[in-house]
Amino acid sequence: MIQVEDLHKSFDGHVVLDGISFEIGKGQVVALIGGSGGGKSVLLKHLAGLMKPDKGRVIIDGADLKTLRGGQLRALRDRLGFLFQGGALFDSLTVYENVAFPLREKTKMKEREIREKVLKELELVGLKGAEDKYPSQISGGMVKRAALARALVRDPEIMLFDEPTTGLDPVIGQAILELIDACHKRISFTGIVVTHEIPRIFSYVDRVLMIYEGKLRVNATPQELMRSEDPVVKSFLGY
């Protein structure tokens, strides 16, 4: 489903990604871990087609993102959902309008169909009754839930999560991880979760990718990672 081949990216001479390669099978969910500023979000933006590599390729379902233009790239992005770190809701729109936005912009659904779909999605993420509130009127956890509903409302084949629990207390953070897992079981997307939620995230993913000094240090199952004798991994995990 997703192939990354020898990916390189630098900014002003600073190497961020230095020959990253991996594959993710259809329906799998992987955690992407590593130190702050280590390139995790940069990699995620390459997968979304928001950045172009200096060298290497990102291939999704056989299509090389670097070669796609115009309608082809838009069609590929239409198959993808992105949960931004801060939620990225529109402050001037209600929760309902935020979730309805991609349906109004990207589909020809009638307003009655949009309402039915949006209210169903909000109920699934635990926001029934909050549809008329604005982002400033709800908690951080509710903002993340609304952003998740917006990302999922078109039933994407691929989901990219950039630090979905940042800024949330441990209880709410755990609830968001459980919600992501429930959504995956419902629509079977292929997913990547950039996270510092270690080891909690290990219960919800098939594999763990670890970036260290621009390179892919680890590509392993959670169980294999926890048994690793690599001193860098042991230090990162705190044991």
Image (cartoon, rainbow, N blue to C red):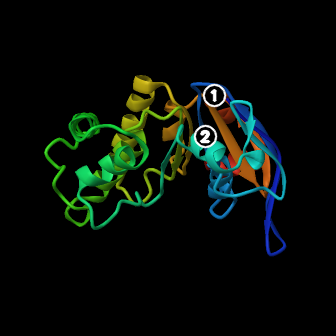
Report the residue marked by disc 2.
76
Say which of 231 and 179 sits in front.
Answer: 179
When asked about the image quadrant of residue 121, the answer is top left
Mark 1 or 2: the one toward you: 2
The residue located at (27%, 67%) in the rendering is: 92
Q: Residues within 10 Å of mark 2 (few under 14, many from 20)?
A: some
Would residue 40 be found to the left or right of residue 19 on screen?
left
When asked about the image quadrant of residue 191, the answer is top right
- Count numbered badges in the picture: 2
The disc labelled 1 sits on which kind of residue?
Answer: Gln
Would residue 154 be found to the left or right of residue 221 on screen?
left
- Position of 160 relative to 2 (above/below): below
Is residue 231 among the parts visible in the rendering?
no
Which residue ends up furthest to the bottom in the rendered image?
A: 12
Which badge, 1 or 2, is on the more N-terminal residue? 2
Query: x%, y% of residue 52?
Result: 74, 56
Query: x%, y% of residue 42?
Result: 67, 58
Q: Element at badge 1?
A: helix
Query: x%, y% of residue 79?
Result: 54, 37
How far apart in space, not on screen, are marks 1 and 2 (Cα)?
33 Å
When asked about the image quadrant of residue 24, the answer is top right
The residue located at (63%, 54%) in the rendering is: 45
Report the residue marked by disc 1.
223
The disc labelled 2 sits on which kind of residue?
Answer: Leu
The residue located at (24%, 66%) in the rendering is: 136
